[in-house]
Image (tube, rainbow, N blue to C red):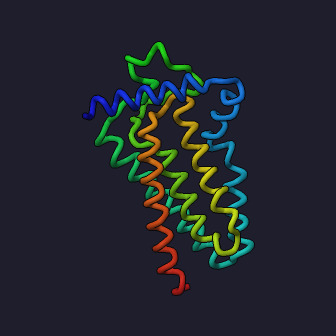
Amino acid sequence: MIESLQQFDAELFLKIHRGLSNPFFDWLLPLMRNRFFWAPLYLFILVFCFIEYKKKGWYIIGMLLFTFAMGDMLASRLIKPFIARLRPCNELTLANDIIHRVPCGSGYSFPSAHATNHFAIAVFLIFVFYDKWKPILPIGLAWAFIIAFSQIYVGVHYPIDVMVGSVLGIIIGLCTAKLYKTLQPQL
C-alpha cells in the first residue's frame, strides 16, 4: 500500500512539475515561494496591526509569530527528521526528470514546511480579521495555496508533502486562533 501511494505521489508530482511546465510558471512560481518576495506583505501586516490595533496589535503579532513557530517546529524539527523522506529533487530515480528551477536544499521533504507555515498563518489571520474584512478568506487561502503549489512545481516537494503540510497548517492555525480568542478578553 505504501509503495503504491508513493508511486501515485511521484506520478502526480511529475504531472505537475513537468506537465504544467511553461515560461510564465517558470517565472512566477519560484517567486511565490521566496520569502523575500513576500517581505512587503509581512511588513504591511506588522505595521497595520500596530497602527490599527495599538496594544492589541502587539498581541496579534505575538500570536502570529507563535503560529509560525508552531508550524515550523512541528513540520521541520519534529516530523521531517522522523519521516526522513528525500525531496524529489534529491531522489536518484527522478534525477533525469527534474527541472532545476530553484536550489534543491538538503533537508527532508515530508511535510512541506512552506505549506504548513503559510496555511497556519493564513488561517490564523482569517480568524482574526474575517469579521471586519470578509475578502481575507479567499485571499488568505489563495495566498497559502499558491505558495504550497509552487513547492511541487519547482521540484522540492511531492504533492502529499504539500497536502499534509497544508492540513497540519490549517490545524495549527485553528488552534492558535482558538487560543487567541480565548486569551483576548484578558487584554
- In percent of width and height, residue 97 lies at 49, 16
Q: Where 14 falls versus 118 (above or below)?
A: above
Q: Which residue is drawn at 55% across and 58% down?
A: 121
Q: Where 178 falls versus 43 (above or below)?
A: below
Residues 83 and 47: in front is 83
Q: Where 124 falls versus 29 (above or below)?
A: below
**Quadrant, the N terminus:** top left
Quarter assignment of residue 123? bottom right
- In percent of width and height, residue 57 lies at 64, 73
* Left or right, residue 36 beside residue 68: right
**Quadrant, the C terminus:** bottom right
Residue ranking furthest to the left: 1
Q: Where 152 falls versus 126 (above or below)?
A: above
- In percent of width and height, residue 65 lies at 53, 61
How many discs appear? Answer: 0
- In percent of width and height, residue 48 lies at 72, 67
Q: Which residue is drawn at 47% across and 55% down?
A: 169
* Left or right, residue 109 beside residue 38: left
Residue ranking furthest to the top: 96
Q: Which residue is drawn at 29% across and 42% down?
A: 82
